[in-house]
Image (tube, helix red, strand yellow):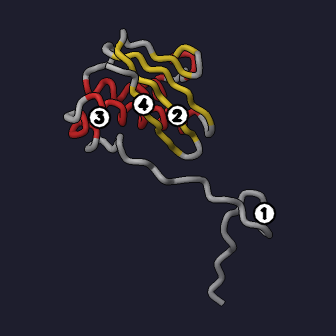
Amino acid sequence: MATIHKIGRRKTAVARIYLSEGTGKITVNKREFATYFPTATLQYKVLQPLAMTGSAENFDVKVNVYGGGTTGQAEAVRMAIARAMCEVDAENRSILKPEGLLTRDPRMVERKKFGQKKARKRFQFSKR
């Protein structure tokens, strides 16, 4: 099996992953997976597609991720891994699709409008 390259996005985070056969080692930005995503919640999100397809120990994952915060990055990595698992085996799609792992979440932070206070995004609504 050749290396599979996939991209996942969430908010402003972009993750590029390279999936190859191996022992289950995950490297994120040339660092150990557990040190890059220290909380159990973020680690669960990243490992979710591998656990659902039952192939956590079969593949090595090398990740380059940039932009956004830690949660956005973890969810971008999750989406990229889910896309790669669909390319490995087409039957994985029926497992991952109902859980929403293949759906791109389009929600972004709304930009600040001029003439407004610091955090405001919309003008104050007035009926008159």
- Side of 111 relative to 34 (left or right): right
Dot placed on the residue nearer the N-terminal end, 2 or 3: 2
- Give the residue type that dot 2 points to: Ala
- Side of 59 relative to 62 (left or right): left
Q: Quarter-wise, where is residue 14 in the image?
A: top right
Dot placed on the residue nearer the N-terminal end, 4 or 2: 2
Residue at the spot 62% in from the left edge and 86% down from the top edge:
127
- Give the residue type that dot 1 points to: Lys
Q: Secondary structure at mark 3?
A: helix
Q: Quarter-wise, where is residue 29 in the image?
A: top right
Dot placed on the residue nearer the N-terminal end, 1 or 3: 3
Residue pushed farthest front?
2
Dot placed on the residue nearer the N-terminal end, 2 or 1: 2
Residue at the spot 62% in from the left edge and 58% down from the top edge:
110
Q: How far is the residue under mark 4 from the one under mark 1?
A: 35 Å
Q: Nearer the viewer, residue 61 or 99?
A: 61
Q: Nearer the viewer, residue 126 or 73?
A: 73
* Location of mark 1 (residue): 117
Residue at the spot 54% in from the left edge and 23% down from the top edge:
37
* Location of mark 4 (residue): 45
* Location of mark 3 (residue): 86
- Give the residue type that dot 3 points to: Cys
Crowding around mark 2 (Cα neighbors within 10 Å: few <14, some 14 to 19, many 20+) is many
